[in-house]
């Protein structure tokens, strides 16, 4: 996934660890931003599943949205997941359940993926 630049010139990059969403913010010089998350890094766990971020958007109000997939160790069923963060890297507890949304699907449908991708591309 491509990194995103915020209006203040900071660079956001997202992906995943072995099992969780990962979100990093760098200052314009390429150094991790210590004012974001924990020393520039935010790791987000969706309980009971493995997850990976595959799309990112920065809203007009500076909030950051990650979209992706989550699945149990058996890889079935798959869930589409969203996490929304405040500009400091903390989860936005006004969004979903404590900043997280999970939509369980019986399979990783192309329609669900295309819908999420279109929404992320508009950002």
Image (spheres, grey):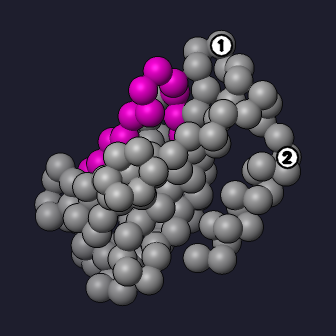
**Any magenta on residue 70?**
no
Q: Which residue is mark 1?
A: 74
Callout 1: few (<14), some (14-19), or many (20+) C-alpha neighbours within 10 Å?
A: few
Seen in the picture, residue 66 relative to 58 is either above or below; the reply is above
Q: CA distance from mark 2 to mark 1?
A: 20 Å
Q: SS for tag 1?
A: loop
Report the span colored magenta: 41-52
Front-most of residues 99 and 67? 99
Which residue shows up at 73% across the image and 34% down it? 105
Which residue is the extreme one toward the top? Answer: 74
Seen in the picture, residue 97 relative to 74 is either above or below; the reply is below
Which part of the image, by quadrant, shows the C terminus? bottom right
Which residue shows up at 38% across the image and 70% down it? 63
Which part of the image, by quadrant, shows the N terminus? bottom right
The image shows residue 119 at horizontal and vertical percentages of 67, 68
Callout 2: few (<14), some (14-19), or many (20+) C-alpha neighbours within 10 Å?
A: few
Which residue shows up at 66% across the image and 77% down it? 122
User: What label does residue 7 carry, if any?
Assistant: none
């Amino acid at each position: 996934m491509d990194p995103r630049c915020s209006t203040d010139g900071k660079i956001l990059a997202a992906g995943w660890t072995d099992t969780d969403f990962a979100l990093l913010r760098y200052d314009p010089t390429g150094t991790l931003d210590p004012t974001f998350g924990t020393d520039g890094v935010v790791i987000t766990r969706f309980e009971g599943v493995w997850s990976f971020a595959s799309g990112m958007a920065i809203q007009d109000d500076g909030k950051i949205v990650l979209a992706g997939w989550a699945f149990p160790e058996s890889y079935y069923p798959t869930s589409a997941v969203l996490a929304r963060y405040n500009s400091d890297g903390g989860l936005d507890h006004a969004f979903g359940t404590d900043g997280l949304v999970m939509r369980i699907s019986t399979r990783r449908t192309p329609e669900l993926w295309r819908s999420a991708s279109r929404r992320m591309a508009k950002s």
